[in-house]
Image: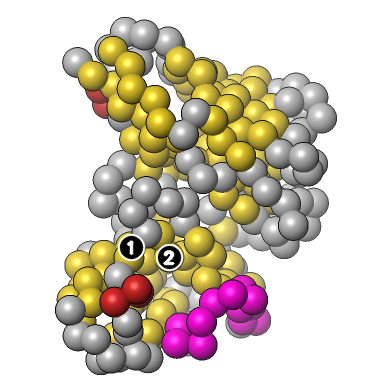
Amino acid sequence: TQLLEQSPQFLSIQEGENLTVYCNSSSVFSSLQWYRQEPGEGPVLLVTVVTGGEVKKLKRLTFQFGDARKDSSLHITAAQPGDTGLYLCAGSDNYGQNFVFGPGTRLSVLP
Amino acid sequence: DAMVIQNPRYQVTQFGKPVTLSCSQTLNHNVMYWYQQKSSQAPKLLFHYYDKDFNNEADTPDNFQSRRPNTSFCFLDIRSPGLGDAAMYLCATSREGLSSSYEQYFGPGTRLTVT
């Protein structure tokens, strides 16, 4: 069974600070997604990474997929209160049969 | 805009009284999923439909059933809700095929309260 771990579990920072959250596994994933979920809403897809070493940028968010496709990171530059939410990573194997979520990182950005 | 819609957004039911949650999608995706999410936890997959094929997770209680009458609609039936079934229920869809990356698109969820 593939498992994803995320760290830190909770993160509270001031507006304008930078931060990085991590998603790790001992298994190889064919693709990995990052979602953001706000209270009372469903997760919203931010990005999908599929190639080892891949880096994708979405405005102030930078996503990286590890070379071995076992881990990923999300870096936020100059965090804003609107970035507050639960960040979930999720991945699947080559056939999409084992789609799993990590436990999430709950981010709070204080004004 | 193409989307995943869940109705109702909030549902209150009594202990033991059957309840049905609805999901519809305009994305024309062939896979639909139901997740249960409790406070401060990640979504937990209950089951999914690959086209018409139903796939149940091993630890999903028999109390939870699902129906998918067509591509666009999927229902979650809870036959005898218990207090422990109070949660957010999320519907998601994906388009799976040889070139897909198995991205899932979520609806806004239905918050179920059991009294």
| The N terminus of chain A - image quarter | bottom right
Give the chain of mark 1: B
Image side of residue A60 versus residue A16, left or right: right
| Residue B59 position (above or below residue B43) | below
Q: Amino acid at mark 2?
A: Gln
Bin the neighbour count of mark 1 within 10 Å (Cα to Cα): few under 14, some 14-19, many 20 and up: many
Report which quarter residue A59 is drawn in. top left
Amino acid beneath label 1: Met
Mark 1 in CB contact with mark 2 (< 8 angstroms): yes
Mark 2, secondary structure of its residue = strand
Above/below status of A68 relative to B74: above
Q: Position of residue A99 (x, y in %)?
A: 64, 55
Q: Which residue is rendered at x = 26% and y = 51% of the image?
A: A40
Dot 1: element: strand
Locate residue A33 relative to residue B109 in the image: left or right. Answer: right
Tell me the residue that label 1 is attached to.
Answer: B88
Quadrant (top left, top right, bottom left, bottom right) of the C terminus of chain A: top left
Q: Is residue A62 visible?
A: yes
The range drawn in magenta is B53-66
Please tell me in which quadrant of the rendered image residue B79 appears: bottom left
Q: Residues within 10 Å of mark 2 (few under 14, many from 20)?
A: many
